[in-house]
Image: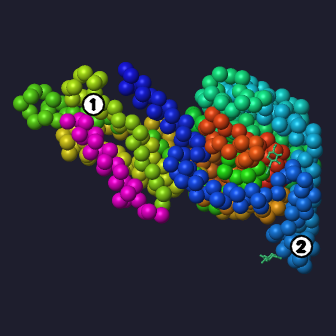
Amino acid sequence: MGAHLALVTIFVTLLLHCCNIDYGAYVTAHLSSDLKGFQFFIEKTNDFFNNKKNDLLSNTFRGSPSNRTSSTTTTTTTTTTSTTLMSSSILEIARRPETIEWIKSIRREIHEYPELAYEEFETNRLIRRELDRMGVGYRSPMAGTGIRASVGTGGPPFVGVRADMDALPIQELAEWEHKSKVAGKMHACGHDAHVAMLLGAAKILKNREHHLKGTVVLLFQPAEEAGIGAKRMIEDGALEDVEAIFAAHVSHQHPTSVIGSRSGPLLAGCGFFRAVITRREESSASHTTPHVDTILAASAAVISLQNIVSREANPLDSQVVSVASFNGGGNDIDMADPKTVVLGGTFRAFSNASIHQIRRRIEEVIVEQASVYRCTATVDFFEKKQPIYPPTVNDEQMYEHVKKVALDLLGPNNFNEVPPMMGAEDFSFYSEVVPASAFFYIGTRNETLGSTHSGHSPYFMIDENALPVGAAVHAAIAERYLNEHG
Ligand SMILES: *[C@@H]1O[C@H](CO)[C@@H](O)[C@H](O)[C@H]1NC(C)=O
Ligand SMILES: *[C@@H]1O[C@H](CO)[C@@H](O)[C@H](O)[C@H]1NC(C)=O
Ligand SMILES: *[C@@H]1O[C@H](CO)[C@@H](O)[C@H](O)[C@H]1NC(C)=O
Ligand SMILES: [Zn+2]
Ligand SMILES: [Zn+2]
């Protein structure tokens, strides 16, 4: 019983970690190698709300647009002028003291009452309350507690921006005024901030609706941490007409308001397996047949699984196969060989081909190794309940779009190209349907404030000064996409 419970615990932990953008040893490795970089970034960062506001606004006009300004064609100049006008007026709305106060208060309200996957009823109510106040139309519920709102002409093109809404079963340990009021639940991944930023973008875009050359679709999605809310949103029509889609995640690895992303693979695809290794019937029947040891068979399978990554994978194509549970036998007193042993684990990779190749090899290796030891094995990949997450792969043009918007809006020192990370995101389900997609980070790290803990830590915190900047970035990504594709 105890062992069974432990297995369940391991699986629950795994499922949650799948969606964590911070994953085990890989993140630790990235973190320590990035630490030197942090100091550098911090020195170079112009915070949106420090005394250099004007500096930042002038930064807005540095970088790539100046090249275009010097171009001789009138149309290019006009585009550049309207883009700079767009950037500065979006920033102007985001910087208003009332916007800043409002967006922080939204985030705090959600933070105090965290709700787990598919239970985001109050969060849904709060989002609708704010959309109603702004006069933004929406469809709700979808995927249980999700919302699809739209701003703009109501016609094409349609560009999507997504925020996830769910919290985690973690007891908040950070002490602050707006600490979670629900025991054992916490917004430890920053999805409260994502909702606040997307509502902020809704406010900015509604304010500028007469400028929009198409429709911005705002997706408030439940259950990112567990339950693949993205998949249910898609099934309920969230992506109807949407031709490009973007989403952000807060990150303790980047200083406040610094945007980070990359072209190509950004986050891993991931899946889970559970293998049951059983002694063949005929060999268990009597003591006269040769002894069959299921523990040894399972151990051989575990060792052979290690070879998939170390001997078969291209060393330049990062992959993980990790056995996280091994369960067989009764208790310490019952020394008889168990009839079955159950193995559980996870696997990750950065390409669709690799993740499916690993899946195939895990099954082959376990079944064949079991057979060597005269056992049978079945491997379950939970594909009905928990399909394999595809990797999050940014489209090159959509990545360039995010980068361009961030540079224009925040200046050249507030954008970083980032390495891929082994964490997974259900945003990849949208990307499968809408390949013109990009996922990016927005920094919330502030050493003074202590917002240096990783997502899923009970001490997780964000620098709320990133919220209005995030709202502006979301809004500008969408509005500019429509300008360039409308
Ligand atoms: C843009 O301008 C900068 C500085 O004026 C220059 O270094 C850079 O090469 C230019 N880029 C292009 C693509 O022309
Ligand atoms: C990834 O592979 C799965 C299964 O073969 C397929 O359904 C899906 O469309 C693929 N996704 C991409 C982005 O190629
Ligand atoms: C960090 O937070 C403190 C306290 O809110 C603030 O005074 C400071 O400007 C912030 N620093 C950065 C780099 O954002
Ligand atoms: Zn998470
Ligand atoms: Zn998250």
Q: Earlier in the sequence, mark 1 or mark 2?
A: 2
What percent of the width, then of the height, locates residue 126?
79, 28
Instruction: Dividing the image into four quarters, tell me where ligand 1 lies.
Output: bottom right
296 inside magenta stretch: yes
- Quarter of image, res 425: top right
What percent of the width, then of the height, locates residue 385?
50, 34
Kindly identify which residue carries mark 2. 69
What percent of the width, then of the height, locates residue 410?
82, 58
Q: Residue at x 67, y 27 (%)?
A: 115
Q: Amino acid at mark 2?
A: Thr
Instruction: Determine whether, in the image, residue 20 is placed left or right of residue 178.
Output: left
Kindly identify which residue carries mark 1. 340
- Quadrant (top left, top right, bottom left, bottom right) of the C terminus: bottom right
Q: Is residue 253 above or below residue 114?
A: below
**Which structural element holds mark 2?**
helix
Instruction: Give the main secondary structure, helix, strand or loop, of the magenta stretch.
Output: helix
Q: Residue at x 90, y 53 (%)?
A: 51
Question: Magenta residues, as a range?
Answer: 293-316
